[in-house]
Image (tube, helix red, strand yellow):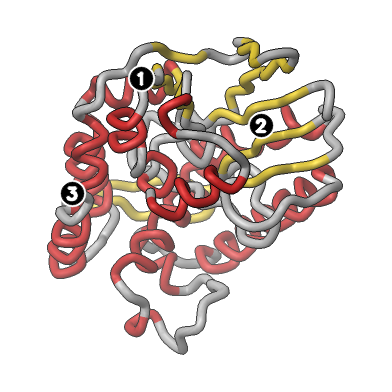
């Protein structure tokens, strides 16, 4: 908060003058300051209607219990599940955020006027179920949150069998691809141009990941946890055993998202044996 305040001071903006606090999605690095900003100002706090529903369903507590159940059913060892429980117990800022009252929600296509500017909200599920991008048409600016990052691939994970986050993400890329965008302002990294090139890069990344998973499964029956260990992740570790807990969490979630996509597209099938899911090519 101190760093943010210092930078706002440089451009002559006082936190107390805030009228609205709007977050693109429900992740700790995007919502952590909400309780403080809300306390320091009289601003209204808004999130997407989908993320609001997630908050009402139980938020972090519900998410963790659902995630751990899915992970267990997909072959994740008990030791790693325990480590994940310890990891998530430290998210005190999310707990504080969940106590903040939501003053209003935002839906796909909603518009928000600030002086002579109009911001349009675009629902782009994938990175989270309720992720929103914000478009300013006069300057052709896209506030992309974590939907389009300039260097790294946005994390797309599955924590609920009723969802197909990778399909949602690919559809959301197409939704943004046709827009007239001059500059992309991402949630992480530097401002960049040519959003269509970046979308093509991201699309190719997921196509290659899909091909790799199909190669891993060819002639074998594996759990999602086992598949994750055979994928060539771009990380600085020589083996799966060296992956920190958080990296394993990311890898397993992304593997599950790709497996769900492949299952629904008819390339693989899911088999339940002794309360554990296995995947094999059709």
From the top left corner, tell me how far across and down residue 3 is, in percent.
45, 55
| Residue 207 screen position, x and y as percent | 69, 54
What numbered label is drawn on residue 275? 3
Q: Quadrant of residue 138?
A: top right
Label 2: element kind: helix
The reply, left or right, for residue 85 in relation to residue 270 is left
Label 3: how many residues lie within 10 Å, few (<14), some (14-19) or many (20+)?
A: few
The earlier-in-sequence mark between 3 and 1 is 1
Which residue is found at the position 13% from the left and 63% from the top? 82
Q: Are marks 2 and 1 in contact (CB under 8 Å)?
A: no
- Which residue in the protein does label 1 denote? 42
User: Which residue appears farthest toward the bottom when viewing the image?
Assistant: 238
Whichever of callouts 2 and 3 sits on the residue coming sooner in the sequence is 2
**N-terminal label among 2 and 1:** 1
Q: CA distance from mark 3 to mark 1?
A: 50 Å
Residue named by callout 2 = 171
């Amino acid at each position: 908060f101190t760093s943010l305040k210092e930078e706002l001071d440089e451009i002559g903006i006082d936190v107390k003058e805030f009228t609205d606090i709007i977050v693109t999605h429900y992740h700790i690095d995007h919502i952590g300051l909400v309780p403080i900003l809300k306390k320091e100002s009289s601003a209204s706090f808004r999130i997407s209607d989908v993320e609001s529903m997630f908050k009402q369903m139980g938020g972090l507590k519900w998410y963790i219990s659902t995630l751990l159940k899915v992970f267990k059913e997909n072959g994740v060892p008990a030791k790693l599940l325990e480590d994940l429980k310890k990891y998530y117990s430290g998210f005190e800022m999310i707990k504080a955020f969940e106590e903040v009252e939501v003053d209003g929600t935002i839906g796909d296509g909603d518009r928000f006027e600030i002086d002579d500017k109009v911001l349009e909200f675009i629902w782009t599920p994938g990175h989270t179920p309720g992720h929103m991008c914000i478009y300013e048409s006069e300057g052709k600016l896209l506030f992309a949150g974590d939907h389009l990052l300039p260097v790294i691939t946005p994390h797309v994970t599955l924590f609920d069998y009723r969802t197909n986050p990778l399909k949602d993400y690919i559809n959301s890329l197409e939704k943004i691809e046709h827009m007239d965008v001059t500059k992309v302002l991402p949630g992480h990294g530097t401002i960049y141009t040519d959003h269509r090139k970046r979308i093509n890069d991201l699309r190719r990344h997921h196509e290659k990941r899909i091909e790799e998973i199909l190669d891993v499964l060819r002639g074998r029956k594996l759990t999602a946890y086992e598949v994750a260990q055979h994928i060539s992740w771009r990380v600085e570790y020589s083996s799966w055993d060296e992956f920190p807990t958080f990296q394993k969490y990311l890898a397993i979630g992304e593997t599950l998202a790709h497996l769900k996509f492949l299952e629904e597209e008819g390339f693989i099938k899911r088999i339940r044996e002794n309360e554990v899911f296995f995947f094999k090519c059709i």
